[in-house]
Amino acid sequence: MPKRGENIHKRKDGRWEARYKKGIDANGKTVYGSIYANTYREVKAKLQFKQQDIVSSYVPTKEHYFFSEVASLWLKDSQLGLKGSSAYRYQTLLNTHILPEFGNRYIDQISGTEINSYLAEKLASGRIDGKGGLSPTYVRSIMLVIKSVFSYASENRMCLPLQTKISKPQSISKELPVLTQDDQQLLENLCLSQIDETKACILISLYAGLRIGEICALEWDDLDLENNLIHVRKTVSRISGTAESMARSILVISQPKTIASFRDIPICSWLVPVLKQLYKNRRSSFVASSSLNFVSPRTFDYRYHKLLQTAGIQTINYHALRHTFATRCIEAGVDVKTLSELLGHTDASITLNTYVHSSMDRKRRQLELLKQ
């Protein structure tokens, strides 16, 4: 069976087709060629021979390309397959970190060794404010963009493939922050006193696991308070600004990144009357807002941290409420498959590896079962 990203598929006539990049046209668009065979294994072998032939017969389309030129073409050619927020993130990584280093260099004169040294430097002292290094996860994102630009360049005969393997920064596994039972109770008590839009949405995140972008995009029409359901259908994303907006970036309401993120989540029965009371006094179509427009994630995050300060709880990021929800579900015996669907994950392993944390108390309780 074909693997994801191979660009191999079975045609209606029974034959297998493999597509490969031949080059780019005058408008910067990729031109594809096709290879056909009767079986998947045969067409894959033909594709590999073709790709080797392209490398061995490499003739550049012009003498040299600047890295910045290739990066611009790559991003433009990838737009159709990217969400606006992803395109904005890649552009930000290029503008902030990559282009200042490689933008004015010819791409065929940049070596894999140089890239590895650059990534190591980013890990050690890559922060823009000069206060230390970037996280391994962030540097891996930079690495993936650089590798994608070089792959695009080699596929389109702008340079040969890199001869030196690019080293992937090792991610440091660390337990993500979760509210303690006591701190969660403190926060809940504060939210239930003089309920307002922000407090209600914090309770929704604690008991439904919504991301901050999903919270800011949530409208009252997305809540079915008769059948106790939340319909998650959209999120607030940051994308590149348009000429009309005169801004570098803008916030928009868009669809979630994956199909799994479209989900229906039951509302805990005790929370329904709280939401119904707030609904009667609503001032906006958006649950988190008191005005016509939605609240930006940054503004909502600021309000959340003010509440933490009022409750005397140590600073913890908003996404930790989602981690807390997942952890409490596991502690209550919710199975991982169900939890994965509630969180909107495409794979249950993501739920286990990223969001489920075992406290020391829980470890002690589990080990005590050995003697029962």
Image: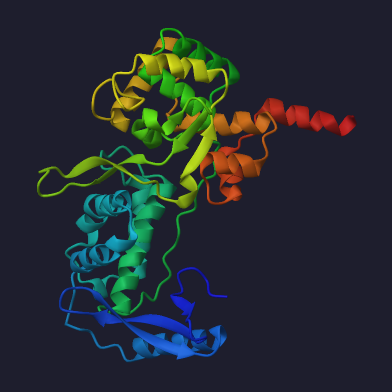
Nearer-the-camera pick, 218 or 184: 218
Nearer-the-camera pick, 176 or 334: 334
Residue in the image at 47% along x and 45% along y? 261
Considering every residue shown, the one lying at the far top of the view is: 193
Residue in the image at 25% along x and 54% along y? 91
Does 13 appear above or below 5? below
Q: Position of residue 292 (x, y in %)?
A: 23, 26
Is 4 left, or right, of 82 in this rendering? Answer: right
Does 6 appear above or below 210? below
Residue in the image at 41% along x and 7% along y? 194
Is 151 left, or right, of 227 in this rendering? Answer: left
Q: Quadrant of the C terminus?
A: top right
The answer to whether residue 114 is visible is no
Q: Position of residue 219 (x, y in %)?
A: 36, 30
Is 361 left, or right, of 111 in this rendering? Answer: right
Residue in the image at 37% along x and 20% along y? 198
Q: Position of residue 337 (x, y in %)?
A: 64, 44
The answer to whether residue 224 is visible is yes
Q: Position of residue 205 (x, y in %)?
A: 47, 28
Nearer-the-camera pick, 317 or 204: 204
Q: Quadrant of the N terminus?
A: bottom right
Q: How many marks?
A: 0
